[in-house]
Image (cartoon, helix red, strand yellow):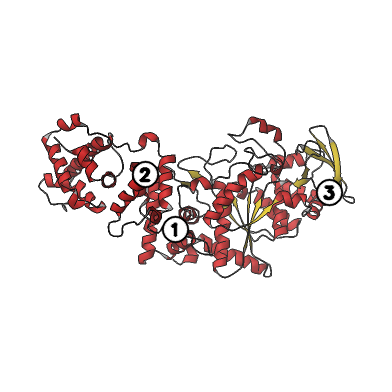
Amino acid sequence: MGVKQSDWVAAAADQVIAEGKRRGGAPLVCASGVSPSGPIHLGNLREIMVPHFVADEIRRRGLECRHLLSWDDYDRLRKVPAGVPASFSEHIGRPLTAVPDPCGEHENWAEHFKVPLRSALAQLGVEVDEISQTQMYTSGAYREQIVHAMRHRQQIDGVLGRYRTKKVEVEQDEEDLAAASAGGYYPYRPYCEVCERDSTVVISFDDASTQMRYRCDCSHEGGFALSETDGGKLVWKVDWPMRWAFEGVTFEAGGVDHSSPGSSFTVGSQLVREVFDGLPPSYLGYSFVGISGMAKMSSSKGGVPTPIDILEVLEPAVLRWLYNRRQPRQSFQVALDQEILRLYDEWDALGRKAAVGTATDLEVAVRARSIGPAAGPLPATPKPLPFRTLASVADVAAGDPEQTLRILQDFTVEEPLASLAEAQPRLDRAQAWVTTYVPAEDRTQVRVEPDRERLEQLPPAQREALKLLLDGLDAHWSLDGLTSLVYGVPKIQSGLPLDAPASPELKVAQRELFVLLYELLVGRDTGPRLPTLLLALGADRIRLLLAVA
């Protein structure tokens, strides 16, 4: 099957290019929108990554394409996230850019959450043109559109009314109800000039003078001419299609909650045509992103890992791969538990397949998009050792650079590492994963002294097994060699050659030896892969801990 037939990115790019041609060669614009109301999580990141891959594919074909990132920073503060002082509840209802930064480091609340995402996007090679909706609304950029929407409020209300009667759970309906609660529908909500909150309802609007009057819950009544003064915003389901027309958006993605019948995209598609004389964009709905079994994420709950957190343990290419390899409507999990080891193994296996020419066309395309954008590949680890190996070494070496380098040089005997820099940045990510996400009780604590009492009580067969292991260390001192040795000792004891296939009885004997070695070396019946652990400890320490008197 060809790439374009099975590749969602290529298929979406085809549709966007065709949409541009239908519009008479209009500029190609992909759009994302994120509200910096709280920590921007991995579900929010999909809002950016889906349009990024589509825009990037278009650029790979030699065409120009803008990727807009609209910061919905003129939205109201709805709730105070976990971890923020409860005193911030006094700011609920105010624009995010009018709320102080909870840490006092940034200009405002919105910037506090934008800054780490900007850093993550830079690491991921995602280039966007940022648009602040605060700046757009308060500069008067949308005045004409606001007045137009207010003059067409009955038409807008009619479109919305087609869906209000349907038994469909439609997001943000409280905005519609509030807009209609003052005896008439108004698709605009001002921020109060006194309390600065949006706890307001419009009570009148004059089409000719554009004079608008409102009432606020704080008891203030005020008003201003919408053609002359700025101080509010269109309700969400009107704001979104207005921007499609204003920016000429040809592609956008949205969560499945925005994509169901009667939801924002359905309503917006009619409003942009009937009210704003524009066209809806080519569109893809995307599903949620979880973390190792965590349910659907909500940025308002706090404590959810953000992209910058994930990039401490996942290389940028691997994170790009997660968002690129699955169809947008497929949900997926980002592993922070032991599954991360398998994830890196899969990524490395894909690289090997691509190198020897056994990867499919689709796999080659997915990998090419993952290692970097059209502008070029992202920085990569010069000598990428298996992540599970690096994690085991980081665990055993406990962050000691000299010990880490010694162990890793034993792993790379054919082309030994000259310095730890050759294993970076993957090594740092393995160390961060061990220290951040591996529970303390699961980390490896190597014995300082041998368990002499246990060693003295060993039966003859186990004594013989340890002696065979110690006698073979020097001749098998490599990862492959030690692997052969630890699996081979029970074979030798059974009178079998090292390459003999493992029978059920032999597997039982191997498992018993592994448990014995773990208990004598780390005081538990499990631990890092034994060959890795042995290399990490070094021959001298192994002899100290396993020598039978």
| Crowd around label 2: few <14 · some 14–19 · many ≥20 (10 Å) | few
In the image, farthest residue toward the left: 495
Q: Comparing marks 1 and 2, which lies closer to the viewer?
A: 2
Residue 87 pos. (x, y %): 66, 30
Up the image or down, 234 lies above or below 90; here it is below
Residue 317 has which mark?
A: none
The answer to which image quadrant residue 224 occupies is: top right
Residue 255 pos. (x, y %): 59, 49
Whether residue 288 is visible here, answered yes or no, is no
**Residue found at x 40% / y 64%:** 360
In the image, farthest residue toward the front: 402
Residue type, label 1: Ala
Q: Is residue 196 left or right of residue 36?
A: right
Q: Is residue 8 left or right of residue 500?
A: right
Residue type, label 2: Asp
Residue type, label 3: Thr
In the image, farthest residue toward the top: 453
**Residue found at x 42% / y 52%:** 426
Q: Is residue 214 left or right of residue 495?
A: right
Which of disc 3 and disc 2 is earlier in sequence? 3
Which residue is denoted by mark 2 in the rendering? 400
Residue 380 has which mark?
A: 1
Separation of residues labelled 1 and 2 (CA atoms): 23 Å
Which residue is denoted by mark 3 in the rendering? 229
Which element carries disc 3, helix, strand or loop? loop
Are the residues tagged 1 and 2 within 8 Å (C-beta)?
no
Whether residue 470 is visible here, answered yes or no, is yes
Residue 313 pos. (x, y %): 45, 47
Front in this rendered view, residue 358 or 445: 445
Separation of residues labelled 1 and 3 (CA atoms): 51 Å
